[in-house]
């Protein structure tokens, strides 16, 4: 899934419906749903049997309350039910007033999630980026080698005048056109903008006005990032073609850094999975597989050499999972490091934006540009990010999830081999644990409730029927059922998150980075709930030729340390240098 916050109003697709829409008797459907909301529910979908029972009722009754109790597992006495009626009716009127108010999608709640409330993990010192010098450069006469080159290699060629940004941009645009039929990874080519940005980059580079390491590098944006002059579809039919009059902060910052936007890339509808209104985005290593999601196009296009790097987003696995599936390197930054302004909101307290590249160093280079407060996403903090591509890892305290490496899994062989590589590098690995006794899966209620609130009017207008996925695990059913989550339980889930953060702090107190199988039980969800940064990198290949992945989990705000260890691992291996044959 994936991302976020102060954003842009999607307009007509989320206009509220009339009060009586869907009613078949004296009690309008929405008023009935409000009655359930007053029971401590978030309001919304009715169970069919209960609706049939009360659709002709003129008011909320004790019988309605008694039926609603069954949905939330609470029982009141007859006297308590009678006492509740007047307050429930008043609450229903308040719900109607709120639903009559048009709340633009970009408006965030007044509260903000703090993944490091005590400030224990925040590093000190200045922010800076010092990428390492590439040890080799691709042959500029071989376009395919340019297509798969790293940011550092492309930057060296651009600054040396060996290739131009316009040449690189046309190369990537041609590859996007050529291979999109295989991958279904492109929503919109931004060719006119890209050529304009590339021509400007070439002029500035020729004049010696270098903006930084991304100057002239073509990139792709997950299509939930608003981009002025182009549609931002969120992968979903109800929002296909929508445009915003302002840009996402990450888009603006990359433009200011001289990067060249060549395409808006696919995401699973409303940041879930890899299926969108144009089909299913494919894995470049196996076109019979989807690319995973929801940053489906960002990972597939990067892996196939269709962009220099891409931006994705994650709520629960949406950078890590497609990066692992497609053999890319993905960074999910610490929560609160990168502004989500201008991105689709899924969960105000869990959404994150980060880079997908060919290497950990690529991701670090991009993060140095997009990170930091903008005054628009109130959850973002001023925390230094210091990246030295030639930094030593000898001082890092490195732990590993011992139990996870001992469990049988399809990737166990390459997982263990990754540990062996780190040990051979001279890394002293310490076994660390994972919190027991906390209901981590139950805390997913946070995401369910917030996503349902974000797409409230989509559900109430019945335009959720236009979404591609309509099964039990798809968004429409999630949004509907989430309306019956008691508000009390939403608060309790967030209190449980506070306990999870404390438990992770305690379990990993003596290490800077934790090495783990990317899909170790509970890891992806737990670290998304807590806000820890994760770097997922290729760790080997299965017998069928598809890549496996290993993850480096940083302490809170320790993105640089996790990236540094990941870079050292990649320097000692060549998994990230492999190319899917069809695209190379």
Image (tube, rainbow, N blue to C red):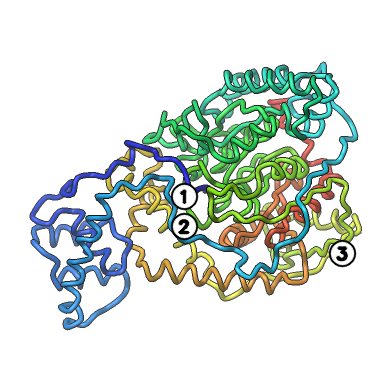
Is the residue 215 above or below the residue 15 in the image? above
Q: Is residue 484 left or right of residue 89?
A: right
Which residue is located at x 79 percent, y 48 percent? 387
Residue 447 image label: 2
Judging depth in this view, the residue of 273 and 366 nearest the camera is 366
Q: Which mark is residue 551?
A: none
- How far is disc 3 from disc 1 in space, using C-alphas? 39 Å
Percent coordinates x, y for residue 67 in the rendering: 21, 69
Residue 499 x, y percent position in the rendering: 56, 73
Say which mark, if any, is on residue 346. Answer: 1
Instruction: Identify the residue shown where x is 38% and y is 54%.
Output: 453
Q: CA distance from mark 1 to mark 2?
A: 8 Å
The reply to whether callout 1 and callout 2 are in contact (CB within 8 Å) is yes
Q: Would you say the residues marked 3 and 1 are in contact, meaning their CB atoms lie under 8 Å apart?
A: no
Looking at the image, residue 11 sits to the left or right of residue 296; the answer is left
Name the foreground residue: 351 vs 569: 351
Asked if one can make out residue 542 in the rendered structure from this viewpoint, the answer is no
Q: Earlier in the sequence, mark 1 or mark 2?
A: 1
Instruction: For label 2, count other residues whose C-alpha is less than 10 Å away and answer few (under 14), some (14-19) or many (20+).
Output: many
Q: Which residue is mark 3?
A: 428
């Amino acid at each position: 899934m994936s991302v976020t916050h102060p954003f842009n109003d999607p307009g007509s697709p989320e206009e509220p419906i009339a009060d009586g829409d869907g009613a078949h008797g004296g009690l309008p459907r929405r008023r009935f749903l409000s009655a359930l909301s007053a029971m401590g529910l978030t309001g919304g979908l009715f169970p069919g049997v209960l609706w049939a029972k009360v659709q002709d009722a003129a008011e909320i009754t004790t019988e309605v309350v008694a039926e609603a109790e069954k949905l939330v597992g609470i029982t009141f006495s007859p006297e308590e039910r009678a006492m509740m009626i007047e307050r429930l009716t008043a609450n229903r009127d308040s719900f109607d007033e709120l639903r009559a108010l048009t709340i633009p999608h970009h408006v965030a709640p007044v509260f903000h999630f703090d993944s490091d409330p005590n400030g224990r993990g925040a590093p000190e010192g200045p922010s800076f980026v010092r990428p390492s010098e590439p040890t080799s450069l691709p042959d500029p006469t071989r376009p395919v080698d340019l297509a798969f080159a790293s940011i550092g290699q492309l930057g060296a060629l651009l600054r040396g005048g060996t290739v131009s940004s316009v040449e690189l941009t046309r190369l990537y645009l041609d590859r996007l056109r050529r291979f999109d039929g295989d991958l279904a990874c492109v929503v919109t080519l931004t060719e006119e903008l890209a050529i304009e940005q590339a021509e400007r980059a070439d002029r500035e580079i020729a004049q010696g006005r270098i903006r930084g390491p991304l100057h002239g590098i073509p990139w792709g944006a997950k299509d939930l990032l608003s981009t002025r002059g182009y549609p931002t579809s969120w992968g979903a039919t109800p929002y296909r073609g929508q445009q915003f009059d302002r840009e996402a902060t990450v888009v603006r910052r990359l433009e200011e850094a001289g990067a060249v936007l060549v395409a808006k890339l696919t995401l699973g509808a409303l940041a879930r999975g890899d299926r969108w209104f144009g089909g299913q985005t494919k894995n470049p290593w196996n076109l019979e597989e989807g690319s995973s999601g929801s940053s489906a196009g960002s990972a597939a296009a990067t892996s196939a050499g269709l962009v220099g790097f891409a931006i994705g987003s994650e709520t629960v696995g949406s950078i890590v999972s497609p990066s692992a599936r497609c053999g890319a390197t993905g960074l999910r930054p610490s929560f609160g490091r990168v502004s989500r302004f201008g991105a689709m909101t899924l969960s105000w307290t869990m959404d994150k934006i980060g880079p997908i590249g060919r290497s950990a160093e690529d991701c670090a280079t991009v993060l140095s540009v997009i990170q930091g407060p903008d005054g628009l996403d109130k959850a973002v903090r001023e925390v230094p990010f210091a990246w030295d591509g030639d930094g030593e890892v000898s001082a890092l305290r490195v732990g590993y999830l011992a139990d996870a490496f001992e469990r049988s899994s399809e990737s166990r062989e390459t997982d263990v081999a990754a540990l062996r590589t780190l040990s051979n590098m001279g890394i002293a690995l310490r076994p660390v644990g994972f919190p027991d006794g906390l209901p981590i899966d139950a805390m997913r209620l946070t995401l369910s409730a917030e996503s349902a609130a974000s797409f409230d009017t989509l559900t109430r207008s019945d335009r959720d029927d236009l979404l591609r996925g309509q099964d039990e695990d798809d968004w429409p059913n999630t949004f509907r059922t989430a309306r019956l989550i008691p508000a009390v339980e939403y608060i309790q889930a967030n209190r449980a998150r506070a306990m999870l953060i404390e438990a992770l702090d305690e379990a990993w107190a003596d290490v800077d980075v934790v090495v783990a199988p990317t899909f170790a039980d509970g890891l992806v969800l737990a670290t998304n709930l807590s806000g820890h940064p994760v770097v997922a990198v290729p760790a080997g290949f299965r017998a069928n030729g598809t890549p496996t992945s290993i993850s480096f989990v940083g302490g809170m705000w320790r993105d640089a340390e996790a990236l540094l260890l990941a870079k050292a691992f990649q320097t000692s291996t060549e998994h990230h240098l492999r190319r899917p044959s069809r695209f190379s």
